[in-house]
Image (cartoon, helix red, strand yellow):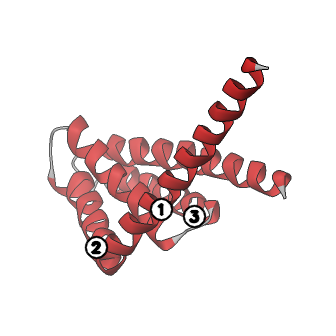
Amino acid sequence: MRNKQVCFSKTQNKETLFLVKLKMEKKIKKFLKPLKYLFLIAFALGIFADVFLFKLSLGPLTLLIFALWILTVWLFEFSAKISFYLAFVFLGLTFLLMVFRVAVIPGKAIVWLYLFLFWAVGQQLVELMKDAKK
């Protein structure tokens, strides 16, 4: 009899934690919603600076810019299509940079290509799992 009560309280705790997490997520989103265009502009400028201006490949900067993208996806509620489109933009950009030798390091565009492909595939899998649950 006691085991059933313990299991019930664990289930109840999980539901309570889920509700608390959901409320916190809504509060954070409500706070950051007015800044979503600022995050999008910072993301675009960061990518431009990384590909065209910086000579060195800076890992922490790449992670920061990619975190801005993840935050932007969350705030704008972008689908995986947008991430795939960006990946294809970087594919075309890589080709143009290699042909015209414009950028400092065309390999940086390739890194962004792979990051966006990885993110888009993961995002698509999450969307498919959500659709399967419905």
Q: Pointers 1 and 2 in contact (CB under 8 A)?
A: no
Identity of the amino acid at label 2?
Ile
| Disc 3: which residue | 85
Identity of the amino acid at label 1?
Lys
Q: Earlier in the sequence, mark 3 or mark 1?
A: 1
Q: Is residue 24 left or right of residue 59?
A: right
Q: Is residue 50 left or right of residue 33?
A: left
Q: Pointers 2 and 3 in contact (CB under 8 A)?
A: no
| Disc 2: which residue | 41
| Disc 1: which residue | 23
Residue 121's place in the image compared with 23, above or below, is above
Element marked by disc 2: helix
Q: Nearer the viewer, mark 1 or mark 2?
A: 1
Q: Nearer the viewer, mark 2 or mark 3?
A: 2
Q: Residues within 10 Å of mark 3 (few under 14, many from 20)?
A: some
Task: Give me the C-alpha separation between circle 3 and circle 1.
Answer: 32 Å
Q: Residues within 10 Å of mark 2 (few under 14, many from 20)?
A: few
Residue 4's place in the image compared with 71, above or below, is above
Q: Earlier in the sequence, mark 1 or mark 2?
A: 1
Residue 24: % across, % down: 42, 59
Residue 15's place in the image compared with 33, above or below, is above
Residue 4: % across, % down: 77, 25
